[in-house]
Amino acid sequence: MATSNLHHYTAQEALNIMTAAGGYDYVTNATVNANTYCAIQALSTDCVISATSTDTDIWDTLTDVTILAGQTIYGEWSSVTVANGDFALVYRKSS
């Protein structure tokens, strides 16, 4: 894993990202791609997602990855798809 973006954000920018200051989208059986997203949280059941990474130093693009119920993963994605019957909160990156 490369660390080229380790200090890419100021402390305030990092705090905004970690606290989802950009809001969130509730997603089930759909794709969201109108924003840049910084976290994906599975709700109530294990959740199968696919996501297009915008920072491949941190994450590769995810395809059919299962996130356990209650688990949150952090990264930077331009598109997130949640499988049929699964529920997730997809947090928008603050601009």
Image: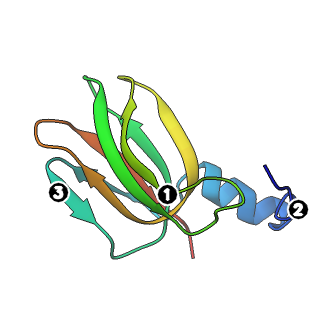
Q: Amino acid at mark 1?
A: Thr
Picture quarter containing residue 47?
top left
Quadrant of image for the C terminus: bottom right
Residue located 28% across and 55% down the image: 81
Residue located 41% across and 38% down the image: 41
Q: Which mark is residue 61?
A: 1
Disc nearest the viewer among 2 and 1: 1
The residue tagged 2 is: 7
Is residue 44 shown above or below 40?
above
Residue located 82% across and 64% down the image: 5
User: Callout 1: helix, strand or loop?
Assistant: loop
Q: Earlier in the sequence, mark 2 or mark 1?
A: 2
Q: Position of residue 76 (x, y in %)?
A: 56, 61
The local crowd at label 3, few if under 14, some if 14 to 19, many if 20 or more residues have their Cα within 10 Å, is some
The residue tagged 3 is: 30
The local crowd at label 2, few if under 14, some if 14 to 19, many if 20 or more residues have their Cα within 10 Å, is few
Picture quarter containing residue 13?
bottom right
User: Callout 2: helix, strand or loop?
Assistant: loop
